[in-house]
Amino acid sequence: MKISKALLIVDVQNDFCPGGALGVQNGDRIVPVLNRYIERFARAGMPIFVTRDWHPPMTSHFNTAGGVWPPHCIQGSKGAEFHPDLKISNDAVVLSKGTATDEDSYSAFAAADSRGAALKDLLRQRGIERIYVGGLATDYCVKETVLEGLMQGFQVVLLQDAICGVNLQPEDSAQAIDAMVKAGVTVAPPVDSFRL
Ligand code: VGL
């Protein structure tokens, strides 16, 4: 039997793109690549899940309240919107994370849809066995998502040409990819030779 697959796009929001509150250098360059993956999955009739960081104005995740990061992706703000060129289809499932005042919620598995359903349950309900992960940022939310997906028993494929890292330290993204590979992620070939 053919295995059920889903695309999972992590946090491709204005604040994580150049000019945003926590802009990832070249973060917007993955958008056209992600659009090609979106098209492939849509054409194959496979579900697409899209997460967003969706923080309250005050949270311990921010450096204004003891955390590490400058305020970003505040609920309802322009910075929290998805990158305007990302072609999210109407039937994609949008999940929000980091909505409480006391959580980092790096992993997409901490996200829930508008009715409060968790990603893991939505995937299981649809019989999804393998997830393909792209988005921002390689060294935080993508990494945590991949590691938790593997831990939850999903097969996880990393879309290496559709991720980009914060790199507080220059090696952070490379180290994150190493950690994901050690944990069992499969690294997909570039989108031109990608096969579903
Ligand atoms: C992220 C840093 C802080 C991410 C979120 O989406 O990778 N990084 N919050």
Image (cartoon, rainbow, N blue to C red):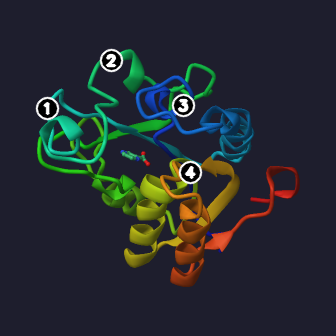
Q: Which residue is mark 4?
A: 165
Q: Are marks 3 and 2 in contact (CB under 8 Å)?
A: no
Q: Nearer the viewer, mark 2 or mark 4?
A: 4
Q: Are marks 2 and 4 in contact (CB under 8 Å)?
A: no
Asked where in the image residue 185 lies, by quadrant, the reply is bottom right
Task: Give the answer, above or below, for where 169 lies relative to 181.
Answer: above
For the residue labelled by badge 3, is the local secondary structure a helix, a strand or a loop? loop
In this rendering, position of residue 111 left or right of residue 24? left
Q: Which residue is mark 1?
A: 58
Q: Looking at the figure, which quarter contains the N terminus? A: bottom right
Disc 2: CA contacts within 10 A as few (<14), some (14-19) or many (>=20):
some
Q: CA distance from mark 2 to mark 1?
A: 14 Å
* Nearest to N terminus: mark 3 or mark 2: 3
Residue that appears at 39% across and 77% down: 151
Q: Which residue is mark 3?
A: 17
* Nearest to N terminus: mark 2 or mark 4: 2
